Amino acid sequence: MKRYIKTRRNMSESSKVASGDTVPDPHNTEALHRLSTEQLQNVPGVEVVGMPALNEEIREIVIVDASALDIDLNQGKIAKIENLETLTQVETLCLRQNLIKKIEGLSTLVHLKELDLYDNQLEVIENLEELRNLEQLDLSFNRLKTIEGLDNLLSLQKLYFVHNKIERIQNIEHLVQLRMLELGANRIRVIENLSPLTRLTSLFLGKNKLTKIEGLDTLVNLTCLSLQSNRLVKMEGLDALVNLQELYLSDNGIERIEGMEHNLQLNTLDLASNRIQKIENVSHLVELQEFWFNDNRMDDWKDLEELAPIKILETVYFERNPLWKDPENAGQADPNYRRKVKLALPQVRQIDATLCK
């Protein structure tokens, strides 16, 4: 059975889908990603003729409106990218959560700015040479082992590779327009080959196999750095990141807070689930608003004095540190825990997940 989709521009934002939710702007790709195929059939401006049964494989896609700017084929059981040649004006194409094994059939989409192939079965990055205007590419949740095939994509600003099998950061040095790079949940052991990407503002390398913070000296425009769930034991290599606002280092093996003398713009510091015994070397971070320090080894209430000078500090997490625990009831919080935190840090509005009264 064929699935026919017709997309009309300027849909009403007040339209309703079957669930009763408000339909997002059709040019808001992130919002459209949340709609299932079944919901899309109720969106004004999208005509779906002959919807297949839930267990029926979609064999052919026919686009009726060749002037469409945004096409969303999310969760369509699509096995092959085909029949898109007429979409010469399309700027956004979403093929999330399908059964696609090969990137193909896109060479005529020269105006494409966003391509989403999240959650498919891709093993190779290929056939993207003609997409020179592409600004955002999402290849997350596939089976990729190597970064390749991006030679002509010089306009890329956002690149996503979450949850693949990538072992090295490579073949992206020429993508100097990149603002965001997401490589979380891969098999990367070394931070490398990023020096030319000086426009990066967000870098995500969580859940890899990194043992050292390095290779970041030229990334002076970074505002967000995530290195959660790696094998780090030392805070280092952060000196050049003078514009950093968010630093995420939870779930590592870090033993001491250090190396942030020049990160004066930090507003969020995540050090949860490490091996740190003492809060130190943070009193100079006067812009800090969020300090996440749960599941460490702090046992001295005097450590909180290090945070006292930070007048705009709003949220702290200390739960499951030794000082949090009730000495008479293992595994439970000390009944006086919250009161003691508030006395030491009266400026704080939230302790752990609970707002202060």
Image (cartoon, rainbow, N blue to C red):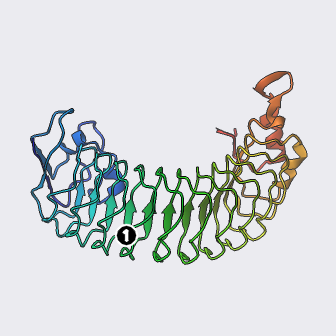
Residue at 67%, 46% (x, y): give it.
Answer: 251
Helix, strand or loop at mark 1: loop
Residue at 35%, 53% (x, y): give it.
Answer: 122
Residue 274, how many percent across, how many down?
Answer: 74, 46
Q: Is residue 176 left or right of residue 94?
A: right
Is residue 87 visible from the viewing direction of this image?
yes
Q: Amino acid at mark 1?
A: Glu
* Residue 338 vs residue 132, the one in the foreground: 132
Q: Is residue 158 left or right of residue 127?
A: right
Quarter of the image with the C terminus is: top right
Residue 192, how many percent across, how many down?
Answer: 60, 68
State which quadrant residue 242 falls in: bottom right
Q: Is residue 148 left or right of residue 198?
A: left
Quarter of the image with the N terminus is: top left
Residue at 66%, 74% (x, y): give it.
Answer: 217
Residue 344, how many percent across, how many down?
Answer: 84, 46
* Residue 160 vs residue 128, the one in the foreground: 128
State which quadrant residue 16 falls in: top left
Q: Is residue 309 left or right of residue 63?
A: right
In the picture as drawn, the residue positioned furthest to the top comes out as 329
Q: Which residue is mark 1?
A: 135
* Residue 131 vs residue 287, the one in the foreground: 131
Residue at 87%, 40% (x, y): give it.
Answer: 299
